[in-house]
Image (cartoon, coloured by chain):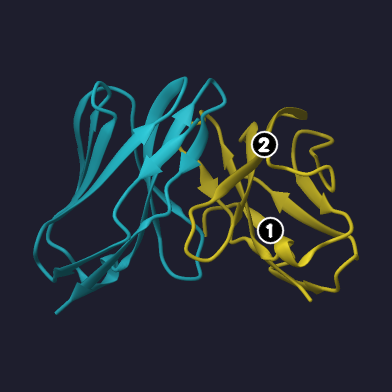
């Protein structure tokens, strides 16, 4: 257990539905990252927050994806109008320095 | 663009030494990460190198050559529990956004 928690751990949804995931980072960590990982691939960067500011967003991220970190603590990732290609493990990581990122257990999304 | 290249799979014997290589091309390079990921689990941080040279941490060591765009992870005294995927990632910019390779699946056999 790294101290980073994610909820839910598993989500099954039908195509076209909206889903929201939550990440609770280590409390003193000001940096928070979201990634997506599919089988046989490394994690793919989605977006990055420093405190409550969203500073980086992958160009690969479609406008169906949105993330927030309203008070600089927990973060949410929402996917609207889900597609089968969105099925993946969604990972959250937090860091104090950026050098060492602590990953949560992930949320596994299955879109049917 | 960003490009990370590492072998797909390696096998080794318990008690032996294995070296996992990684080459990278990235703009705004700001360090090289290695992570370990067991099947079905999240990645676990192993090392971060930003300067050339070797850094040792117990049974694991990591090496970086910035001029060659090359790194390796060295695992000594292999144990069965070291069977996992090892992810190489190059960080860029002040945000330390990592670009991950596909991972090297290491199988340790008795």
Q: Is residue A27 visible?
A: no
Name the residue located 77 percent from the left edge and 30 percent from the top edge: A52
Coordinates of residue B21 in the picture (x, y in percent)? 24, 46
Categorize mark 2 by other alpha carbons within 10 Å: few (<14), some (14-19), many (20+): few
Q: Chain of mark 1?
A: A
Q: Is residue A96 above or below residue B52?
A: below
Could you tell me residue B14's position as x and y percent?
13, 71
Are there few (<14), some (14-19), or many (20+) residues within 10 Å of tag 1? many
Classify residue B75 as left or right of residue A6.
Answer: left
Circle 1 or circle 2, nearest the eye: 2
Task: Tell me if A104 is positioned left or right of A54 in this view.
Answer: left
Quadrant containing the C terminus of chain B is bottom left
- Residue A32, image x, y percentages: 64, 38
Q: Nearer the viewer, residue A14 or A71?
A: A14
Note the chain letter of the cyan one: B
Residue under label 1: A6
The picture quadrant where one finds residue A91 is bottom right
Find chain A in the image and tell me its colour: yellow
Residue B9 place in picture, x, y as percent: 29, 64
Numbered badge on residue A58: 2
Chain under numbered label 2: A
């Amino acid at each position: 257990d790294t101290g980073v928690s994610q909820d839910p751990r598993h989500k099954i949804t039908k195509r076209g539905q909206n889903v929201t995931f939550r990440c609770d980072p280590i409390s003193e960590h000001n940096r928070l990252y979201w990634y997506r990982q599919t089988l046989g691939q490394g994690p793919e960067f989605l977006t990055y927050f420093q405190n409550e500011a969203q500073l980086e967003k992958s160009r690969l991220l479609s406008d169906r994806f949105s993330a927030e970190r309203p008070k600089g603590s927990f973060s949410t990732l929402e996917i609207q109008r889900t597609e089968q290609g969105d099925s993946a493990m969604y990972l959250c990581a937090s860091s104090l320095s950026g050098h060492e990122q602590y990953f949560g257990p992930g949320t596994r999304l299955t879109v049917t | 663009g960003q490009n990370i290249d590492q072998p797909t799979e390696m096998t080794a014997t318990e008690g032996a030494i294995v070296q996992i290589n990684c080459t990278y091309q990235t703009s705004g390079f700001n360090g090289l990460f290695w992570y370990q990921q067991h099947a079905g689990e999240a990645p676990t941080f192993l090392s971060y190198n930003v300067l050339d040279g070797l850094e040792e941490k117990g049974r694991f060591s990591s090496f970086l050559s910035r001029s060659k765009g090359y790194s390796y992870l060295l695992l000594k005294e292999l144990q069965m529990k070291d069977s996992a995927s090892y992810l190489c990632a190059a960080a860029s910019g002040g945000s330390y956004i990592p670009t991950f390779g596909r991972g090297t699946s290491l199988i340790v056999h008795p």
